[in-house]
Every structure is written in C-alpha cells, then in structure tokens.
Image (tube, coloured by chain):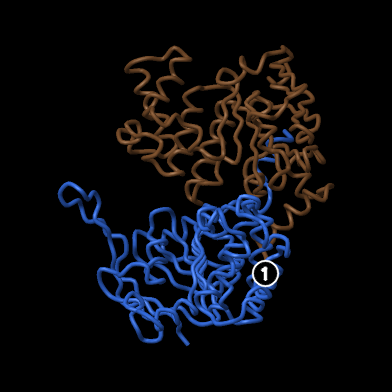
Chain colours: A blue, B brown
Amino acid sequence: MSLLRVQQVEHGYRSGGLLGRGKWLQVLEGIDVQFEAGQTTGLLGSSGSGKSTLARLLLGLERPSQGQVSFAGRDVSRLRGEAARDFQRAVQLVFQDAPSAFNPQRSIGWSIAEPLRHLSTISQAAQRQRVLQLLEQLGLSAEHAERLPQQLSGGQLQRANIARALAISPQLVVLDEALSNLDRVLQVQLLQRLEQLRRDTGTAFVLISHDLSLVRYFCQRVMVLADGRMVEDRSVDQELSFQHSAGQQLQAAMLPSRPERARSEFDRA
Amino acid sequence: MPTPTLELRTLSVASRNTLLVDQLSLQLHRGKVCALVGSSGSGKSLSCLGMLDLLPQGLRRSGGELLLDGVSLAPAQVRGHVASLVLQNPRSAFNPVRSMASHAQETLKLRGVHGADARQQMIECLAAVGLGDHQRVLESFAFQLSGGMLQRMMIALALMAQTPYLLADEPTSDLDALSQARFLELLMELVEGHGLGVLLVTHDMGVVARCADHVLVMDAGRIVERQDTQGLFDAPASASARTLLDAHHLLTGGHP
C-alpha cells in the first residue's frame, strides 16, 4: 500500500527578492515516486541535490510549483482541519539540527509530549507513560524527561528529537540528515533501535542522507537525487551497484572498511 | 637522519575539579598521519587545542612541552608557523566583520607574501579545496557561506600557511561524502608529496583506514591504546577501540 505519492513534481525558488525579481532556480524536476507502508527508503544525494526540498514537499510544508504530493488520495499541501491532523498523525519529520528544534525553556519530556497534546486525546498520565516508553526505546532514561535541552549532549538531544517524532505512532517518519551529526557508534545504535521499531510496529522510514553506508545498512530501497532529478530507484542488496554516475560517485567516495594495503606496505618498506 | 618530528610531552588539561586530559604525550612525523580516535567527550578536541595553548577560559593546561626536532618551543612559536589548526566548527573560527580575502591576506603576510603573488596563492589554495568560485568566496563574510564552504576555506587557509604540520579536529564531519573524499585525497597528496605531518582527530574508523599510519585511542582523557593502523584493525586491544571498530564494520558490511 502506498502511503505518500509524489506525482510529476517540479519545484524551485526565486533568488533575491526585495529589489526586482531574481532568477528562477529550478530545484526539483519530474519527480514521480511512491513511499510504501512499512518500508525503509534511503534518499541519497550530495549537497544541493534537492533532498531537503523534497522532504519539505513530502510534509506539505510547501506546495510544489507543478504536480502534487498526495496522502490517501488528497493533496497534502491543501489539507486543513481534521484532515491535516490525520496527516500529521501519519507522517512526521526530523531535522538535522536538534538544538534549534527544542524550546530551550521547556523540559525534554514536555517537548516530546507535544504531538500527544495536539494530536491525541489521551490523558496526562497516559502521555507521561508514553514519554517514558519512548525515552526507553531510544536508549534514554526517565530522568532525561526532567532536563532542559541544553543539559543534554548532542547525541542525547537528537534521540529525544526522534522520540518526539515517534510519539504519535506515525506510519512514516522522514529523517532529514537526522543522524549526520552523530558519531558512528551512536548512528549504529540508533539505526538498530529504529529497525526494531519497524519490525514491531511497521513504521516506515525515509532516511535522507549523503552517507551511503547508513543507507546500505538500514534501508530496503534506495533512491538517488542528482541536480533535482531522481536518477536511480532500486532495492538495496549486498552488491549494491548504481547505473547513474551520481550513485557511482557516492559509492566511490565511501571510505574503506580496512586499511588500504598499498599504504601499509609503504610503511613497512 | 631521523624523521623530522614534532613532539608533545605530558599535556594535562583540567577544569576546576576534573582532569579532562591526563598526561598526553605524542609524536608527529613529517609525511605521516597520526589519528586520535575516541568517543564523544573523551578529550580529543581539548588535546588538540591544549597542544597549541588555545583552551577556552576556565580550563588549566599543565605540562605539554613542545619539541620540534628536539628543540623546545613555546606554543605561540608553534601555532601558525610550525603547525596549523583546522577545527570542527568552522563558523566560530572566522572574524565575522572581515572578508575571506582579509583572512587570507593575514595568513599570507606571516610568510611575507603580498600583492599579486598573494592573490595567485589564494586562488590556487581555494581551487585545491574545491572552492572554484574564488571571486565570490573571497568577497564573502562568514555568514554568507555554508558550513561546508567555511570548512574548506579553513583548510585553504591552513594550506596558505604552508606549515610542516597540521592539527585537524574532525575536519570532514560537516562535509558531504563527496567533499570528504576530495578533502582526504588532497590531505594525502600533501602528506605523501610534501611531507606534511598530521594529527587527525576523528571518530570515523573509515577515515582512519583511509589515511592514518598510527592510531592513538583515547578514553576519558587517557590514551588507552597506541598501535599502527594495520595492527589496530587486526587486533584492537582496548574496549574503546573495539566499540569503534564494531560500529564501523557493521556500517561497512552487515545489516541490523
């Protein structure tokens, strides 16, 4: 079953602004994809390829200049009232910059419960219970709920950020470079927890990243964006190989898993 | 003749009541890369800053004698002349009211390079780090450039200084995969071609595998393991090294 459907989407921005009309900058062209329930999809691309713009369109934060993104058959950028709330219950987004995503004057627990206050009708006690459960799922503890954002490390705060996106039990979570600032050990731990969640609840994920190793580790399907076009869409298997040069470049840029032979021989000489 | 060496002896860094770096000693050799690895908060960045006596206020530095080929030097004689520094968070490293060109001029003036020569070197160094649009970049102020561009600008400044040693604190963690690969290639060219000696602080064992000759593993401010890179990958002795390598091997091989 497809959750989100992107049809013939084009989008761009006008540069400049106040004085005269700036140049039109085309960011996305001819994007046509579907995101399936329960599936993990990696969206790869280098800086400036249009990944984050696509994320904003998926969430209905902007309306594409051509085409549409639809959820359950309805254009996500035109949803209002209860239909918009239904959409927010189904699809959530996590950005890269966790510190700016939290109210500095409110506790972590308060922030994580925010989607529950706005999008559910469960009691305060049940909300507290849910927050504790989420903290535990992401490897944090109950005492973190009482702390302020600046009292958590970057890695802890990003986990709290993801906990908030998961609070309302969405069907799809878009992670926009949400793991990029974490070290390798934390990245692996988080992906293992999210994989467990996907198995238990069927939550689908879209992992937006420039890091092929994260996508290969976590995702079942991979798409590559290059200069605003979707140049690759394939399933992830052991010998992941790309047809398009953009994918091949990302693959060539991957760091080696073992020290390179030539250099260690050079050392011994 | 022994390899030219920059040596640091028993550097300790402490806050009011906690020891953050405990008696760190290390040697950098020309033409070699020494990696300093460890998890977040293990004291890697403080070691880097402490080495050049650039610690933030409130932290105390003790020991930390610097010897260039056996001759003792003050940290102020070392920074910018013997060793350049590239930091993780590039935005705070630039003066917000001065353009990139003005930063570059200051660096080049230290070496007595002025005028058209200076301009030529700026263009070359910017091209080397992949900042092709040098006109725009040099006219820009820090707030007008992206994090990745600032990071590359900082590396370009280190290139302009032409110091024999480079201390790099997570130099690629803000760059995308392609820029990272390009930067590491450039770094290795400088190491192998020009004999640059590097201290590379990182948490990514892929970067270690790609570049490093030797590895120091840090945990809670202490060096818990010293190995050559091949040895570390073949037989890690410390728990910290094993944790980092396990994560690395999962990401480059397996599935969750």
Q: Position of residue A20 (x, y in %)?
A: 15, 49
In which quadrant is the C terminus of chain A drawn? Answer: top right
Residue A165 vs residue A215, the one in the foreground: A165
Query: Is residue B3 something one can see in this rendering?
Result: yes
Q: Residue placed farthest to the left in the image?
A: A20
Q: Residue placed farthest to the right in the image?
A: B237
Could you tell whether B202 is left or right of B171 in the image?
right
Label 1 is placed on what type of residue?
A: Arg
Could you tell whether A27 is left or right of A52 in the image?
left
Q: Which chain does the residue under circle 1 lie in?
A: A
Q: In this view, does A37 lie above or below A112?
A: below
Q: In this view, does B185 lie above or below B103?
A: below
Could you tell whether A202 is left or right of B134 in the image?
right
Residue B250 vs residue A244, the one in the foreground: B250
Residue visible at 34% across and 22% down in the picture = B119
Q: Quadrant of residue A147?
A: bottom right
Q: Where is residue A68 in the image (x, y as percent from the top left)?
A: 31, 76
Number of marks present in the image shown: 1
Q: Is mark 1 on a helix, strand or loop?
A: helix
Residue B175 vs residue B139, the one in the foreground: B139
Q: Is residue B143 above or below residue B118?
A: below
Residue B113 vs residue B100, the one in the foreground: B100
From the image, tell me which residue sits under label 1: A193
Residue visible at 65% across and 50% down in the picture = A151
Q: Residue placed farthest to the front in the image?
A: A124
Query: Is residue B256 something one can see in this rendering?
Result: no
Q: Position of residue B182 (x, y in %)?
A: 49, 43
